Amino acid sequence: MRHLLPFAVLAGATGLLIGADAGTRPAAESMSFFITSVGPGDGANLGGLAGADRFCAQLAESAGVRGREWHAYLSERASAGKPAVNARDRIGAGPWYNANGVMVASNLAQLHSEESALGKENSLNEKGDQVNGRGDTPNMHDILTGSLPDGTVAVDTLDTTCNNFTSNTAGSGSAMVGHHDRQGGGMRPTSWNSAHGSRGCSQQNLVATGGNGLFYCFAR
């Protein structure tokens, strides 16, 4: 038995390594994608892209993930002499893993294709919990992005970013949202990042159309 124990221990360790190679995460620190469990509570006013990035970092740190550079998946329209910003250009090259160690996409091309693993089951918040979707009470599947399906800024004659995510007032435009559960209504109901525009920019308007001011966060 003394000769068998080291082999058993080695076999167990080897199994753990195989599991890690197969895509399971060895520790919580490997999380590089999540939906915010809450929004700032000020409608689509996230403090701009910089404020949204800070919010991502704060939530990640509260979940025990440190030392990562976090960016909100949000696009910004050209304004005041500044060029437009595309959400896809802010988040690095991948791969990205959720809080349970599931790889949701290996690269930008897969992320913005039907081959990604995004959906209600895998688009978790930073705590590893599922986010309410269609059929849940309350429904919170509208996720702020300001983006088109390819991850570029949604350009229209009307505002699609709630003044670059600094506005929370009624009648101040709209924000393009995606459906994290990939179902519902709108122009593209199964799109995770570009389903339809919100009713408005206030917290009440975001809630009324099936959201709660939540957004996606990715680590570079």
Image (cartoon, helix red, strand yellow):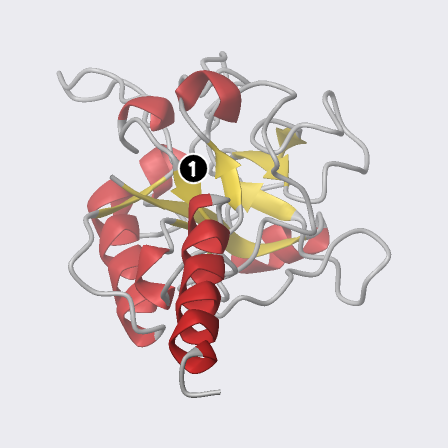
Residue located farthest toward the bottom when viewing the structure as drawn: 2
When the figure is inspected, residue 174 is found, relative to residue 123, above or below; the finding is: above
Q: Residue 86: image x %, image y %? A: 33, 21
Q: Can residue 93 be seen in this view?
A: yes
Expressed as whole percent of the image width and height from the top left, the position of residue 100 reads: 52, 60
Amino acid on which the number 1 mark rests in the picture: Cys
Secondary structure of the residue carrying tag 1 is helix
Q: Decide: is 215 above or below 58.
A: above
Q: Does residue 168 lie above or below 4 as drawn?
A: above
Q: Quadrant of residue 65?
A: bottom left
Q: What residue lies at 67% left-to-right and 56% top-to-bottom?
A: 140
On-image quarter of the C terminus: top left
Q: Please tell me in which quadrant of the rendered image residue 91 appears.
A: top left
Q: Residue at x 41, y 21 (%)?
A: 108
Frontmost residue, 173 versus 84? 84
Of residues 33 and 47, the one nearer the viewer is: 33
- Residue located beneath label 1 in the image: 162
The picture places residue 212, in percent across and down from the top left corner, at 58, 58
Answer above or below: position of 47 versus 57: above
Q: Position of residue 51 (x, y in %)?
A: 24, 52
Viewer-proximal residue among 27 and 37:
27
- State the residue at coordinates (50%, 33%): 173
